[in-house]
Image (tube, rainbow, N blue to C red):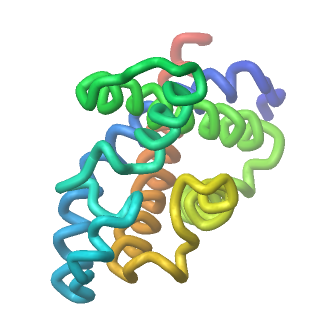
């Protein structure tokens, strides 16, 4: 039986989280299209922060955070820079949370049950369903259009799944390199 190695778990998790974040970003447009076909938002709802990444990417929570930081520093920021800079938040959060997940998986392998999908749901609950609205960067889920809640939650499930599958693959590679 291998000994838990928190650093290895965190490093593998962080790398897997970058891949998971990329998959999450790729999943959002088709999930948005699908959920909006089932639950069409009103034009006013589509203008809400975080409700329309396909049409208002510069009004997603990470972009709003970048804008708030620029405003606090009394610095002007272009739409182009805001769109670029929000990627640091997106991928940084993905890598950071997956690093914690990877370290936990070393000690408590049960966190990986469900191929990472439950972990993705927990991440949605800790971010877009609580912390992000609590800081004022997005409305609470019950205030958003149902389609926005569904595609955002769904993209977090994709993040969890892809992160876990990538983590498993990287574990195999790491073990082969150690032999």
From the viewer's side, name the closer residue of 146 and 176: 146
Above or below — where is 26 with respect to 128? Answer: above
Quadrant of image for the C terminus: top right
In the image: residue 79, left or right of residue 128: left
Percent x, y of residue 77: 36, 23
From the viewer's side, name the closer residue of 17 and 73: 73
Percent x, y of residue 42: 24, 82
Residue lying at 39% horizontally and 75% vertically, measured from the top left = 150
Residue lying at 78% horizontally and 26% vertically, measured from the top left = 6
Q: In the figure, residue 140 lies in which quadrant?
A: bottom right
In the image: residue 157, left or right of residue 36: right
Residue lying at 81% horizontally and 30% vertically, measured from the top left = 4
Percent x, y of residue 161: 46, 54
Above or below — where is 147 with respect to 90? Answer: below
Task: Please identify the residue farthest to the top as the structure is shown.
Answer: 178
Above or below — where is 94 with respect to 45? Answer: above
In the image: residue 38, left or right of residue 97: left
Q: Is residue 138 visible?
A: yes
Q: Is residue 16 visible?
A: no
From the viewer's side, name the closer residue of 5 and 76: 76
Residue lying at 79% horizontally and 34% vertically, measured from the top left = 1
Above or below — where is 154 with respect to 101? Answer: below
């Amino acid at each position: 039986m291998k000994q838990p190695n928190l650093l290895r778990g965190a490093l593998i998790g962080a790398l897997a989280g970058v891949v998971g974040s990329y998959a999450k970003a790729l999943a959002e447009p088709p999930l948005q299209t699908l959920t909006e076909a089932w639950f069409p938002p009103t034009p006013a709802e589509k203008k809400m922060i975080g409700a329309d990444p396909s049409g208002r990417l510069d009004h997603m929570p990470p972009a709003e955070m970048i804008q708030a930081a620029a405003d606090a520093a009394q610095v002007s920021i272009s739409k182009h820079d805001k769109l670029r800079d929000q990627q640091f938040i997106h991928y940084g959060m993905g890598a950071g949370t997956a690093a914690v997940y990877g370290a936990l998986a070393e000690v408590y392998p049960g966190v990986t049950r469900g191929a990472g999908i439950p972990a993705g749901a927990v991440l949605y609950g800790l971010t877009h369903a609580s912390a992000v609205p609590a800081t004022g960067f997005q409305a609470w889920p019950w205030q958003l259009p149902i389609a926005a809640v569904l595609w955002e939650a769904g993209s977090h499930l994709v993040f969890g799944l892809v992160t876990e599958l990538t983590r498993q693959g990287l574990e195999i590679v790491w073990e082969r390199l150690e032999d």
